[in-house]
Image (cartoon, rainbow, N blue to C red):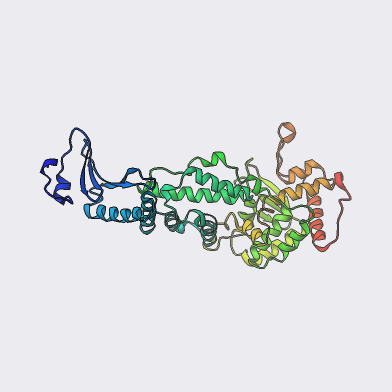
Amino acid sequence: MKRSEIKRRPLSDTALAGLEPDANEYRELDGSGLYFRVKPDGQKSWQLRYKKPDGKWSWLGLGGYPEVSGSVARQKAAELRTDAADGKNPIVTKQARKKAERDIAGETFEPLAREWYASRLTNWDAGTAKRIIGALERHVFPVFGKRPYADITPLEWMEFLRGMEQQGILEQMSRVRSYCRDAYDLARVTGRATHNPLEGLQKYLQSGKAENYAHVSPDELPGLIRAITAYPHAHDVRLGLRLLSLFAVRPSELREARWSEFDFTKKLWTIPVERKGRKKGLEHLVPLSSQAIEALEELRQYTGSYPLLFPGRSDHTKPRSDTVFLMALRRMGYEGRQTGHGFRHIASTVLNENGFDENHVEAQLSHKKPGVAGVYNKAQYLPQRTKMMQWYANYLDGLASGVVIQGDFGKRA
C-alpha cells in the first residue's frame, strides 16, 4: 500500500501491515501525536511526538511493529500524553512502566537467580543449598533483586562487590560473584541475555585469601577455645573445630579425612598424597596428642560407622560442605576474625614465639622449603613434632582454663 492510499486515521490494521517503504524514511500520523514510522529497509515502529517540560518538542519510541500492535501503541501513547499533561517526563514514566512490566514477566534479577538456584538444587546438600540462597537473600536481592537483570551494568556489579570487600568478607564476596555470574550464564544460554556483566570482574577484585587466613589475636584465643568447647549445635562440627585447633592442618585435609588413615596404636594420622589441598602431592604424618585422641574417640561415637570422619548429611559418601567450619565460626561470632585455615597461623605463631625449632614447626605444617635442605620426608622430625604438638595441646587447654604454659624446652623439642 502506498502512503497516498491511506483513507482514514487511526490507521487500520490493513494499512499498518501493507504500507510500503520509500527511498527515504517517513512517518504517518495515526492520531493525537502518535506516528507510524517506516524505514527504507521495511522496518516499522511507533513514535510519539511530545512536548518536554522545557517546552521543546521531541520523539519517544514506543516499540517496533508488529510486536507492538496499533491498539497497544495507542494505549501507551494515551498514558504518556496524560503524564505530559500532568507535568511528568514521559521518558521517565515510560521507563517506570517498562520496569513494572519486566517485574511481572520475571525479568528482574531475583526471579532469575532463584531459577538458577532451583536448577542446581539437586547438586548440593541441604547445608550448601541453605548457605547459597542465604547469601543471595542477605547480600544481593536487597540491592539488585527488583532490577531488570539486563539493565544492571558491570560498573554497578563492581561497586557492589567492592562494597563487600570493604566489609572484609572477601570469601563471601567471591562466592556471591560466582553465584550471580552463573545466574547470568543461565539467562545467556536460554536466550534471555546477550552478555554476562560479571564476566572478568574477578581480575579487579581481591581474592578470598586474606579472609581465608584470618585469625584471632593472642588475647582473643582463650575465648575462642572456650567458645569451641561450648559450641551447642552439631557435635561433629564442634569436634572438628577442636581437631583443627589441635592439628593445625588444612581444613580440607581434616574435612575429607577417613577413619582408615588413623593409627591409634602408633598415635599417627597419615594424610594421603591425593588429599585435596596437598599441593606438593606428598604424604604427611600428623602426630596425635592425647587431647586429639580423646576428641577422635568422641567423634567416632557419632560418625564411626561411616568411612569419613565428617560425612555429608544427605550423602554419607561425600564429606561435609567445604564451609562447614567457617559457618560454625560465624555462628559463634567470629566472622571475618577466624577461619579454619587461620588455626595454622595461630599454631605457627605460638610455637615459634615459644622457642620451638622453626624446622619442626614448618615440618608440622607440611611446608616444604626450596633447595636441597627442603627435601621432604613424611616422617621428618616426627619425635620432636610429637613432643611439640603435645605441648601445644596442653597450651591450648591451659589458655581455656586460665593456666599459662610456657615453652620450657624450646629448641630442644
Residue 181 in the image: above or below residue 304 = above
Quadrant into which the N terminus falls: top left
Instruction: State the residue at coordinates (14%, 47%).
Output: 15
Would residue 96 be seen by someone viewing this image from the given angle?
A: yes
Q: Quadrant of residue 312?
A: bottom right
What is the x, y in percent for residue 341?
67, 50
Residue 171 in the image: above or below residue 129 = above
Left or right of 232? Residue 45 is left
Left or right of 136? Residue 36 is left
Give the farthest residue toward the front: 55
Looking at the image, which is closer to me, 21 or 387? Answer: 21
Looking at the image, which is closer to me, 186 or 242? Answer: 186
What is the x, y in percent for residue 314?
52, 63
Give the farthest residue toward the right: 408
Q: Quadrant of residue 305?
A: bottom right
Would residue 185 be seen by someone viewing this image from the given angle?
A: no
What is the x, y in percent for residue 278?
63, 44
Instruction: State the residue at coordinates (82%, 43%).
Output: 357
Instruction: State the residue at coordinates (78%, 47%).
Output: 349
What is the x, y in percent for residue 176?
53, 51
Left or right of 324? Residue 230 is right
Number of marks in picture: 0
Instruction: State the residue at coordinates (69%, 50%).
Output: 214
